[in-house]
Image: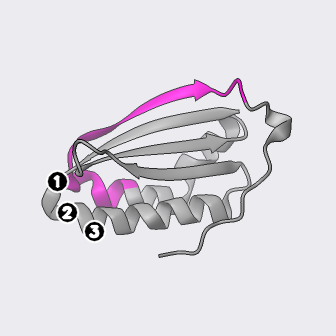
Amino acid sequence: MKALFVTIFMKPEHKDRLLDELWSDAYGSERDEPGCLMFNIAQDDADPNVLHLFEVYRDEAAVDAHVAMPHFKRFAEATKDWQVKPFQVVATTVLYPRPESWAKRAAPPHR
């Protein structure tokens, strides 16, 4: 199991557009990628222009599949100029819960 912690630093004037693209990417990830087990988006309490993503994937191949998906490529290309700096990614290996305890979550309704 792989987990990614991603931090996005948005330009305030592009926040709404970036969020729309991000929701499409998150929804597409959970809907279209069997290896994507979780895709959470959180707003920083100290700075509303900073987002934190928590993504869980079945394995490294699922992470590779994610970055190759059209919805991710569209997000990355569309939003690159809407960010103060490139997003930061911390890649980790999940120790708990154990892989056998994960069940594929149903994708949430799209906003």
The crowd level at tag 3 (other Cα within 10 Å; few <14, some 14-19, many 20+) is few
Contact, mark 1 vs mark 3 (Cβ under 8 Å) = no
Where does the image place residue 19, in percent across and percent down from the top left?
34, 63
C-alpha separation, residue under disc 2 versus residue under disc 3: 5 Å
Kind of residue at disc 3: Arg
Give the residue pinned by disc 3: 17
> Which residue sits at x=31%, y=45%?
44
Q: Quadrant of the N terminus?
A: top right
In the displayed structure, 29 sits above or below 44; it is: below
In the displayed structure, 93 sits above or below 61; it is: above
C-alpha separation, residue under disc 2 versus residue under disc 1: 6 Å
Where does the image place residue 4, in percent across and percent down from the top left?
53, 36
> Which residue sits at x=66%, y=50%?
36
Q: Which residues are magenta?
A: 76-96
**Residue 75 in the figure: left or right of residue 61:** left
Where does the image place residue 66, in percent across and percent down from the top left?
58, 49
> Which residue sits at x=66%, y=42%?
57
Secondary structure of the residue carrying numbered label 2? helix
**Residue 71 in the figure: left or right of residue 21:** right
Query: Is 87 within the magenta?
Result: yes
Kind of residue at disc 1: Lys
C-alpha separation, residue under disc 1 versus residue under disc 3: 10 Å
Give the residue pinned by disc 1: 11
Give the residue pinned by disc 2: 14
Regarding residue 70, the answer to whether it shows in the image is no
Which residue appears farthest toward the right when viewing the image?
100
Kind of residue at disc 2: His
Regarding residue 97, the answer to whether it shows in the image is yes
Contact, mark 2 vs mark 1 (Cβ under 8 Å) = yes
Which residue appears farthest toward the front when viewing the image?
45
